[in-house]
């Protein structure tokens, strides 16, 4: 069986290597090392040891993933003509060493023996240099593959492989999404050696520190100030749980799913208003209020033992993946129209085995009447129950208006109400035909009326008059003037 012996060079100098590791390196032929930029390699070179390094690979490729894959490919190619090779890496082979992980996968797939020879990782000297206890919670991440969503700012955070100013800049920008620009971090280089250096600096200066090399790691202390956790989702959960808890707010404690219904609707409309205003700050605030309603409902579910916010998140995540196979699977969708067709087909499949449902099912009962009429007509139209031309719609409108006047003459209030509803329903059909959203159209008219009416109020205030002191004709004159300003 072919064999690769992977040796860890440790985190320090030659004197810190075990005798066993030193002997493996001395006997190795051929010996490959990932990088010669390491104190041990410098000393071994002085002893006349020969080796092949992969430092040149870093210049050939733009991404670290490509570098690591190339190194592994070269090592595997060497095994075509060799029975055994030795590969040396900084620190411990199983700590922050992507090439070793790739070798382990390839070894399993190709029946190659991968023998790991230890070596002290940088972690022990790092904990000692920083005087921290990892039992309090410690996260170790790769600076070359840093992702904002993986970071836990409540724990000690050690970011390794911060080789140069470019990586340090990427690390800085990622951290600044979570922490203040002046948050103090430590740049630790060559810990545990005679060259050890620890520099404290504000986050915004991280990429300006001169001592950055392949032995550099960045330490981010855990956040302890509550206010710095306000972006943290877990903190929001804690706040809501506290409000609903025994020592919380009496109002929040009393709320139920039923009692919160009006607030969710109100907050949703306020979001729409912020969107119409094109005010991002206002939109952030109102979206937060909608999220608050979601969190309150989830906390009530958790308090009652039925569900938690985790179940809510799982439900929507699973649904989005399931209903977007053109993104997460092998289906295709050329445009948004095809996306909608696929979406409806998936929904139909989800209903297989259930009782036959109406075409009109799925429209919320509590939806405002105007919006509900629009949705009812859309669903009916999908199965062909719709006019192809506007002419019969206008004729239907005249018929409904005539029926309304018939009931008006005999003052039948109940039937007047029904006939007036029929008139509105036809108007919504016409809106659909002309591709006008009736809710948006009426919203625009409401805004226009409000602006013009407020213009009357402002003009009367300028003249020191009240509504009681002017005639309808005078108000109408101001209204007509305001039309020039508010179209």
Image (tube, rainbow, N blue to C red):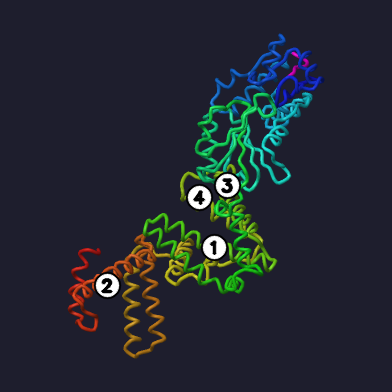
Q: Nearer the viewer, residue 60 or 144?
A: 144
- Which of marks 4 and 1 precedes in the sequence? 1
Separation of residues labelled 3 and 4 (CA atoms): 10 Å
Report the magenta stretch's main SS: strand
Q: CA distance from mark 2 to mark 1?
A: 35 Å
The structure residue drawn at horizontal position 37% and vertical position 59%, both measured from the top left corner, is 276
Q: Mark 4 highlights which residue?
A: 339
**Category of crowding for the residue at label 1, using alpha-carbon neighbours closer than 10 angstroms: few (below 14), some (14–19), many (at least 20):** some
243, above or below 14, in the image: below
Q: Secondary structure at mark 4?
A: helix
User: Residue placed at 72% from the left, 10% from the top?
Assistant: 47
Quick check: 428 above or below 83?
below
Residue linked to disc 1: 292
Q: Residues within 10 Å of mark 4 (few under 14, many from 20)?
A: some
Residues rendered magenta in the picture: 82-87
From the top left corner, tell me how far across and down residue 310 is, in percent. 64, 57
Q: Which residue is disc 3 drawn over? A: 325
Q: CA distance from mark 1 to mark 3?
A: 31 Å
Does label 2 or label 1 sit earlier along the sequence? 1
User: Residue 453 got which mark?
Assistant: 2
């Amino acid at each position: 069986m072919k064999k690769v012996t992977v040796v860890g060079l440790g985190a320090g100098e030659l004197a810190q290597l075990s005798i066993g590791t030193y002997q493996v390196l001395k006997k190795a032929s051929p010996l490959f090392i990932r990088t010669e930029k390491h104190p041990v390699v410098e000393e071994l070179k002085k002893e006349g040891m020969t080796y092949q390094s992969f430092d040149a690979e870093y210049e050939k490729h733009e991404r670290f993933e490509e570098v690591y894959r190339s190194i592994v490919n070269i090592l595997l190619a060497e095994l075509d003509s060799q029975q055994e090779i030795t590969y040396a890496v900084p620190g411990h082979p199983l700590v922050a060493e992507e090439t070793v992980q790739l070798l382990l996968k390839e070894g399993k797939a190709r029946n190659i023996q991968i023998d790991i020879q230890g070596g002290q990782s940088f972690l022990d000297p790092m904990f000692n240099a920083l005087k921290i206890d990892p039992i309090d919670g410690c996260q170790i991440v790769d600076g070359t593959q840093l992702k904002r969503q993986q970071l836990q700012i409540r724990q000690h955070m050690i970011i390794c492989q911060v080789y140069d100013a470019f990586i340090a800049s990427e690390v800085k920008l990622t951290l600044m999404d979570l922490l203040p620009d002046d948050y103090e971090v430590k740049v630790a280089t060559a810990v545990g050696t005679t060259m050890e250096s620890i520099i404290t600096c504000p986050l915004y200066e991280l990429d300006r520190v001169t001592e950055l090399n392949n032995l550099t790691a960045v330490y981010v202390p855990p956040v302890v100030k509550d206010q710095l956790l306000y972006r943290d989702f877990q903190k929001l959960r804690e706040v809501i749980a506290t409000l609903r808890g025994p020592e919380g707010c009496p109002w929040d404690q009393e709320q139920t799913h039923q009692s919160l219904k009006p607030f969710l609707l109100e907050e949703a409309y306020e979001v729409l208003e912020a969107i119409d205003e094109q005010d991002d700050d206002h939109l952030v605030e109102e979206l937060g209020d909608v999220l608050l309603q979601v969190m309150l409902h989830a906390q009530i579910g958790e308090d009652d033992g039925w569900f938690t916010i985790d179940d809510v998140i799982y439900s929507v995540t699973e649904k989005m993946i399931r209903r977007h196979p053109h993104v997460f699977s092998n289906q295709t969708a050329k445009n948004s129209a095809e996306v909608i067709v696929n979406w409806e087909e998936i929904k139909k499949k989800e209903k297989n085995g259930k009782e036959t449902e109406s075409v009109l099912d799925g429209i919320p009962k509590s939806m405002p009447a105007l919006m509900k009429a629009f949705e009812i007509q859309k669903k009916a139209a999908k199965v062909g129950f719709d006019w192809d031309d506007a002419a019969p719609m206008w004729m239907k409108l005249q018929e409904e208006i005539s029926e309304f006047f018939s009931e008006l003459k005999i003052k039948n209030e109940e039937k007047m109400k029904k006939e007036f509803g029929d008139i509105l329903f036809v108007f919504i059909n016409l809106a659909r035909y002309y591709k006008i959203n009736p809710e948006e159209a009426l919203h625009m008219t409401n805004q226009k009326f409000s602006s013009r009416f407020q213009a009357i109020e402002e003009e009367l205030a300028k003249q020191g008059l009240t509504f009681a002191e002017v005639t309808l004709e005078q108000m109408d004159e101001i209204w007509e003037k305001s039309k020039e300003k508010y179209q």
